[in-house]
Image (cartoon, rainbow, N blue to C red):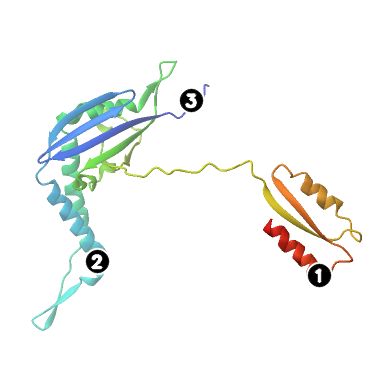
Amino acid sequence: MKNMKNNSHIFNLKIQKIEQICLFELSWGEGQRLTTQVNYPSNLNQLYQDWRQAYLNFYQSDNMRGRIVNGGIAVINIDWHAELVKAESKLMYEFNRWLRSAELYEIRAQIARGSEVSTNDNLIVNQEVQIFLTCAPIELDRFPWEAWEIGTEFGSTKTIKIIRSPLNINTEPTTLKPKNNTRRTRVLAILGDDKGLNFEVEKKALKDLEKILYVEYVGWQPQETPSQVTEKIINCDRT
């Protein structure tokens, strides 16, 4: 059995809303491009706001169980979870109905075709599809694009990943000064009595690193006072 590599196909999709028209531009490969425009649903923004409010109501429901009316307590029994599910269903239905527009058929078909690749044995295997999505204005970017049912009408079972990409990327180039790799690190080796102790092993270990280290030795001699040894160490640090 032949081993097959896990290939991926990459698309860039830019969506821009101008008044009540949305421009879709799909690009891939070596300059290939598809463009189209489709009417923007007038009720999509309101459905999004309804879903957003239902979401907030559900997660704040512990503080919304009752209110005082005419000196008494009127209990509000609202199933906020059911309201959230209903608002989400309405939003997703209209969102996917819009994206199933006939004007977007070629774009959907091209993405679905990108999930398939022919092998040398004329077999069709699935490959990963990544879509880098850019939206403008911000209201478009808030929609649940990851839930777009792109490949279902073409029978594609491969997961299509949608990756959000910002419209503008403004970063100042960072200028790094080249490091001086030829300069060796200075090491001060403070040894004891050269006559009383044998430091040959330590010196050999440091010598083996002389390509990257500059080693200066300071040792104590019997005729030297502690203050004289200290002075030598200080003088080495200043050089």
Q: How crowded is mark 3: few (under 14 residues within 10 Å), some or many (20 or more)?
A: few
Q: In this picture, is 44 found above or below 1?
A: below
- Whole-percent x and y of residue 10? 35, 31
From the top left corner, tell me how far across and down residue 147 is, in percent: 27, 42
Residue on which disc 3 sits: 4
Q: How far apart are marks 1 and 2 (CA)?
A: 74 Å
Q: Name the residue under label 2.
A: 60
Q: What element carries label 2?
A: loop
Q: Disc 3 or disc 1, which is closer to the eye?
A: 1
Q: In which quarter of the image is residue 39?
A: top left
User: Could you tell me the amino acid type at mark 1?
Assistant: Pro
Q: Name the residue under label 1.
A: 226
Query: What residue is drawn where x is 20% and y is 28%?
Result: 35
- Identified by mark 2, the residue type is Gln
Q: What's the residue at 12%, 82% (across, down)?
A: 72
**Which secondary structure lies at badge 1?**
helix
Above or below, 124 against 38 in this view is: above
Sequence-first tag of 3 and 1: 3
Q: Residue furthest bottom?
A: 71
Q: Position of residue 237 (x, y in %)?
A: 69, 59
Q: In the orientation shown, which residue stands out farthest toward the right?
A: 196
